[in-house]
């Protein structure tokens, strides 16, 4: 007779009840998949190790704080944490080559590192757009409406004023407040919006 495999949810429950073995089994169960995913993105074993450890530390801290909500599968949640940490890493390190011109035998190709920069940039841009769209949802209805019309529908303020049945100054004011409120939200939520 085979022993029944304990689900991720049950392991989380055991861990939250004080059984440290629960988290150990959970980490061992998913470590290969999470590490392989991180390594595939960053292409550096040492960096992948660091992000891997940070991923599980963040997960454990979230579990301990009681903020974890069982919305789906644990593996999807942990992979999302890893993905966000990789994006944060790419945002923080621009990977700009430094040129050393002190020697007479200078060769530009000795200083350049070949990376998959376009993939990194694409991932960061996708995350930035996702972050901005999520933040826009927090804006008041009128501000959100003007912002979408201006930036996503490329409408002029004259057209926006006519469409929303307000003056051009009101449409401009709503846009101004939308941008001010977005900046506040970006600061409050500590979101990095650069590639």
Image: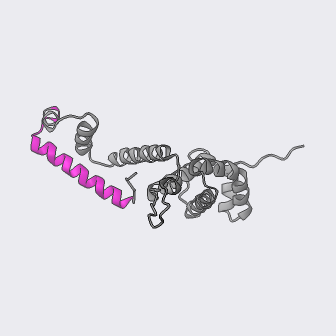
Is residue 168 a member of the stretch shown in magenta?
yes
Residue at horizontal 52%, vertical 49%?
A: 115
Q: Quadrant of residue 150?
A: top left
Residue 142 in the image: state x and y as whole percent.
22, 43
Find the residue positioned furthest to the right: 1
Residue 182, above or below 153: below
Q: Which residue is farthest bottom? A: 102
Q: Main secondary structure of the magenta part?
A: helix
Which residue: 41% across, 45% down?
125
* Whether residue 70 can be seen here: no
The N terminus sits in image quarter: top right
Position of residue 18 measured from the top left corner of the image (x, y, whole percent)? 69, 65
Q: Position of residue 59 (x, y in %)?
A: 59, 58
* Color encoding of the figure: one colour
Q: Is residue 158 magenta?
A: no
Q: Nearer the viewer, residue 87 or 103?
A: 103
- Looking at the image, which is closer to me, 41 or 104? 104
Q: Is residue 192 visible?
A: yes
Q: How many marks on residues?
A: 0
Q: Which residues are magenta?
A: 163-189
* Image x and y of residue 164, in percent: 17, 35
Q: Residue at x 62, y 57 (%)?
A: 52
Q: Is residue 102 left or right of residue 144?
A: right
Residue 9 horizontal side relative to residue 132, left or right:
right
């Amino acid at each position: 007779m085979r022993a029944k495999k304990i689900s991720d949810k049950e392991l989380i429950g055991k861990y939250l009840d004080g059984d440290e073995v629960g988290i150990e089994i959970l980490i061992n169960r998913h470590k290969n998949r999470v590490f392989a995913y991180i390594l595939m993105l960053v292409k550096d074993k040492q960096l992948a190790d660091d992000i891997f450890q940070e991923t599980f530390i963040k997960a454990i801290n979230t579990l301990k704080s009681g903020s974890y909500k069982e919305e789906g599968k644990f593996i999807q949640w942990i992979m999302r944490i890893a993905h966000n940490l990789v994006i944060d890493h790419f945002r923080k390190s621009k990977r700009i080559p430094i040129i050393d011109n002190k020697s007479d035998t200078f060769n530009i190709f000795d200083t350049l590192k070949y990376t998959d920069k376009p993939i990194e940039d694409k991932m960061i841009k996708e995350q930035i757009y996702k972050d901005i769209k999520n933040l826009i949802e927090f804006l008041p209805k009128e501000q959100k409406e003007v912002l979408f019309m201006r930036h996503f529908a490329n409408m002029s303020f004259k057209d926006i004023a006519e469409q929303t049945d307000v003056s051009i100054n009101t449409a401009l004011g709503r846009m101004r407040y939308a941008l001010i409120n977005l900046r506040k939200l970006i600061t409050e939520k500590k979101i990095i919006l650069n590639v």
